[in-house]
């Protein structure tokens, strides 16, 4: 491959790649994201390759292992073009049929089609599935269209066109103006205006400057950044080169956690390819601008997502935060001005440059522009990644896109913003998703993790889970975070064990306020949010644990007991055989009894009982 | 010079100084635990927090690292400052109930019993020993290891480090007396770091000094001769 030296050469390459593509050609996109691979898409891919070869169809069909299209719940996912046929849950033994029927004649295989749970009807095309209908994919749009390990796939769809435009037609100031006018705000969670951050970095004195991409995504249940790096690493790189040009940096780092091996691999491939094509390195597209990117792997500390700890880690020091100011844009890596943005923020940049600030600023709300990606997990039907315009309400997101709560259970609350975020209860479901509204409710936008809970979730136990996470991930440098989060965990633990005391709620609230006000970094300052928000919206549940020693959701084991109902039990013996503690006794066809001293409260008896005879109290 | 307002008083401070330095320069007392004027500030103990008053509202900042800039308005003992310090001391008391320096601070604030128990450590992880060993001695014989509640100060791999020179700077700087020095006959031990040395007693003053082979500088100083 020869290096692309000018914007014209890039356009020429794009044109020739586009001409090679036959719009009527059959293209199979199989999701190769971590989720679908875990469900077996690797073997499906191998089987497809073999079968296509065996059928001698290699020159009629393009097979692509792509990034994540979002509907992780139903993986492995497959989309077949040109029709846009959507298959889900594809298994190896279904491959021959897919090849012989769908690939040859376009005939659909009924059993692989998605069934709309609300109507019971089968839906053949991706674009008609409710999960996709209300989304507005910008960042995720290309994920199912390209092979992330192929730079030409990206270029064919206009990739690096924004970079070319920036380098040939725009000054650095104009780039910053464009990003400022688009009103892009940091997608890492805090929502700082990106254009302003870039301007501060640009105006900071010094010749050496750096840009950093924060890909240390660590929130439990969050995988937005992973999906982007796995599925479309070039978009992030393109954003970083544009950012480097705008602020005057010639070196960039991507800090990606080592637990994301596929993301790191695809990114490394992308960097190598971009260098080969002259899109990274010296004199990019003949502009005289030099820029290169290196990868740094994080070693598994959540706190390294905090920008000052992240920089310490890149420098080779212990990943501990330091006080701000000075902010990284004034004094960052090795004391030089450093512009740190999240993966999604960088990914938005080429989109803004391509479509213009006005176009971008039309999406979203007054204060929050563009789209937002959430990873929706927990008690929800359509687990996966969704991208919606800012301003979409929580109800639309959870019920229309997310498909609501499984098993006809009732929605209870949604935790937004991970361990730094808060729980939002059902009375606020019509809140539009934007930075300010969520903060007002005691949550935060955060990076995009969203955990849905239902009536069977105990909110005290839920808060305890997040507190356990943050106290474990606290770096331990400052007292309020190291000891305060531990104290909150102790109190929450004793409450869930039925040992809560009068005054515990007040103490939790006080601790929370002080940890928030006094901690050194963002981790500590936001760590109490899950507890403070559940205290605010679910005080009754705390009170029930503390005063009545009961867990209304029947979750906290020390506070519940399992009984077998006299009337309903017919003595089938299923529970007796299942009980791992041998706590159940009773003669066949006679009522069974649980010995409370032996019962370990695992709930297995309730799960296996066909007559709903096992009751929890 | 820089002019700022501390507790309603206009004070002057050297350009480049921190709020804590500016306050102390003007005889305004701010309590600290992890601060030492000979060492880089750490901002870990959070006892030195002060209220920074801005048009957008108030916030707490660590005075040991916050730069004293012109026009800054700071309160060192306001309600929110006191509440924050109180919680910090209560937490420290919960984790290190036998540390005299913490007991004294708690007594001053009228804290009797912490509302939780977080163990019985003698170390409050202020990091003074680590910074002294690094910045003053240049030995880097100890460091902070692990994170969160499991954080502690240790020599590398938790075994006596041959980088330790037995200089005892860490012993001197520790606010809780957690690092114990033992000089017995011809030996010196810093038990916490598992450091043991041959140390001779001075024939004149009776103090111990290290055998020259453990402290090369001393060897030079003494010209190979024993005092």
Image (cartoon, coloured by chain):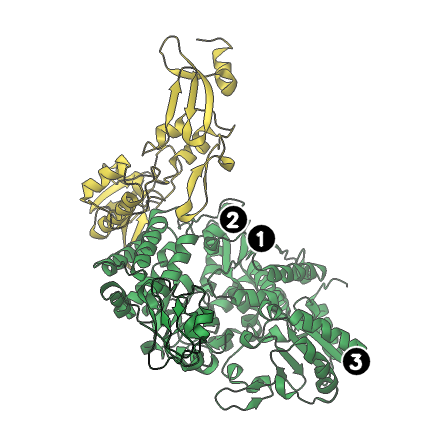
- In this rendering, the answer to whether A380 lies above or below B53 is below
User: Is label 3 or label 1 in front?
Assistant: 3
Between disc 2 and disc 3, whose residue precedes? 3
Q: Is residue A92 left or right of residue A585?
A: right
Between disc 1 and disc 2, whose residue precedes? 1
Between disc 3 and disc 1, whose residue precedes? 3
Label 3 crowding class (10 Å Cα cut-off): few <14, some 14-19, many 20+? Answer: some
Q: CA distance from mark 2 to mark 3?
A: 50 Å
Measuring from the top left, give residue B45's x and y in whole percent.
Answer: 33, 43
| Residue under label 2 | A313
Q: Contact, CB < 8 Å: mark 1 with mark 2?
A: yes
Q: Is residue A270 left or right of residue B110?
A: right
Q: Is residue A554 left or right of residue A397?
A: left
Chain letter for the part of the structure drawn in yellow: B
Residue A519 showing in the rendered view: no
Please name whichever residue, A522 or A57, is drawn nearer the observer in this view of the structure. A57
**Residue projecting furthest to the front:** A587
| Residue under label 1 | A296
Label 1 crowding class (10 Å Cα cut-off): few <14, some 14-19, many 20+? Answer: some
User: Where's the C terminus of chain A, which quadrant?
Assistant: bottom left
Q: CA distance from mark 1 to mark 2?
A: 9 Å
- In this rendering, the answer to whether A97 lies above or below A468 is below
- In this rendering, the answer to whether B133 lies above or below A425 is above
Chain letter for the part of the structure drawn in green: A
């Amino acid at each position: 491959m020869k290096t692309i030296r000018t914007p014209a050469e890039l356009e020429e390459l794009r044109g020739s790649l586009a001409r090679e593509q036959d719009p009527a050609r059959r293209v199979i996109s199989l999701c190769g994201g971590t989720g679908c691979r875990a469900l077996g898409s690797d073997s499906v891919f191998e089987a497809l390759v073999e079968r296509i070869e065996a059928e001698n169809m290699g020159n009629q069909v393009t097979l692509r292992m792509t990034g994540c299209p979002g509907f992780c719940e139903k993986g492995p996912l497959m989309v077949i073009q040109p029709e846009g046929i959507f298959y889900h849950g594809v298994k190896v033994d279904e491959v021959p049929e897919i090849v012989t029927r769908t690939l040859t004649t376009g005939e659909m295989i009924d059993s692989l089609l998605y069934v709309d749970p609300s109507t019971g009807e089968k839906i053949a095309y991706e674009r008609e599935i409710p999960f996709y209908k209300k989304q507005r994919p910008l960042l995720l749009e290309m994920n199912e269209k390209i092979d992330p390990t192929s730079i030409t796939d990206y270029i064919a769809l206009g990739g690096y066109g924004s970079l070319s435009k920036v380098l040939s037609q725009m000054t650095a100031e104009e780039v910053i103006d464009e990003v400022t006018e688009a009103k892009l705000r940091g997608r890492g969670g805090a929502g700082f205006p990106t254009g302003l951050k870039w301007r501060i970095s640009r105006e900071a004195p010094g010749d050496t400057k750096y840009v950093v991409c924060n890909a240390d995504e660590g929130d439990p249940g969050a995988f937005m950044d992973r999906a982007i790096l796995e599925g479309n690493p070039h978009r992030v790189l393109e954003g970083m080169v544009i950012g480097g040009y705008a602020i005057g940096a010639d070196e960039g780092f991507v800090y990606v956690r080592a637990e994301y091996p596929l993301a790191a691999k695809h990114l490394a491939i992308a960097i190598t390819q971009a260098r080969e094509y002259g899109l990274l390195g010296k004199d990019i597209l003949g502009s005289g601008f030099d820029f290169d990117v290196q990868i740094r792997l994080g070693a598994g500390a959540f706190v390294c997502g905090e920008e000052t700890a992240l920089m310490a880690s890149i420098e080779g020091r212990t990943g501990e935060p330091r006080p701000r100011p000075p902010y990284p844009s004034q004094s960052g890596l090795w004391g030089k001005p450093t512009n740190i943005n999240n993966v999604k923020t960088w990914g938005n940049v080429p989109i803004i440059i391509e479509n213009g600030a006005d176009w971008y600023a039309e999406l979203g709300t007054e204060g929050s522009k563009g789209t937002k990606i959430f990873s929706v997990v927990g008690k929800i039907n359509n687990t996966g990644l969704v991208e919606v315009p800012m301003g979409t309400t929580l109800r639309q997101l959870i019920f229309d896109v997310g498909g609501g709560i499984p098993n006809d259970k009732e929605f209870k609350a949604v935790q937004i913003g991970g361990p730094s975020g808060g729980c939002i209860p059902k009375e606020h479901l019509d809140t539009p998703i934007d930075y300010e509204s969520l903060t007002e409710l005691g949550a935060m936008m955060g990076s995009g993790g969203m955990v849905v809970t239902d009536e069977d979730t105990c909110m005290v136990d839920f808060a305890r889970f997040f507190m356990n996470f943050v106290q474990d991930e606290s770096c331990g440098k400052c007292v309020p975070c190291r000891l305060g989060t531990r104290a909150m965990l102790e109190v929450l633990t004793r409450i869930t064990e039925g040992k809560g005391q009068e005054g515990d709620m007040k103490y939790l609230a006080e601790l929370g306020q002080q940890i928030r006000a006094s901690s050194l970094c963002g981790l500590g300052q936001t760590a109490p949010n899950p507890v403070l928000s559940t205290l605010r919206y679910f005080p009754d549940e705390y009170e029930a644990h503390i005063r009545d020693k009961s867990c209304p959701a029947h979750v906290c084991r020390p506070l519940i007991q399992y009984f077998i109902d006299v009337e309903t039990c017919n003595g089938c013996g299923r529970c007796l055989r299942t009980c791992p503690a041998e706590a159940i006794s009773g003669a066949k066809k006679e009522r069974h009894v649980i010995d409370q001293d032996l019962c370990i409260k695992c709930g297995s008896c309730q799960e296996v009982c066909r007559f709903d005879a096992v009751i929890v109290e | 010079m820089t002019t700022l307002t501390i507790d309603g008083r206009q004070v002057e401070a050297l350009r480049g100084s921190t709020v804590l330095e500016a306050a102390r320069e003007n005889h305004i007392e701010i309590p600290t635990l992890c601060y030492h004027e000979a060492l880089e500030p750490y901002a870990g103990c959070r006892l030195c927090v002060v209220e920074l008053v801005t048009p957008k509202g108030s916030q707490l900042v660590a005075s040991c690292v916050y730069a004293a800039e012109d026009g800054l308005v700071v309160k060192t003992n306001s309600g929110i400052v006191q509440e924050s310090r109180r919680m910090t001391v209560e937490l420290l008391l919960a984790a290190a109930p036998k540390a005299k320096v913490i007991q004294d601070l708690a007594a001053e604030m009228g804290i009797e019993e912490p509302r939780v128990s977080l163990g019985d450590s003698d170390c409050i992880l202020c990091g003074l020993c680590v910074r002294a060993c690094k910045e003053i001695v240049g030995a880097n014989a100890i460091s902070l290891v692990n994170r969160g509640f499991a954080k502690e100060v240790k020599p590398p791999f938790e075994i006596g480090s041959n980088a330790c020179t037995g200089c005892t700077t860490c012993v001197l700087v520790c606010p809780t007396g957690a690092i114990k020095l033992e000089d017995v006959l011809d030996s010196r031990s810093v038990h916490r770091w598992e450091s043991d040395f041959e140390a001779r007693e001075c024939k004149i003053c009776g103090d111990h000094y290290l055998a020259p082979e453990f402290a090369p500088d001393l060897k030079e100083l003494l010209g190979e001769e024993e005092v």
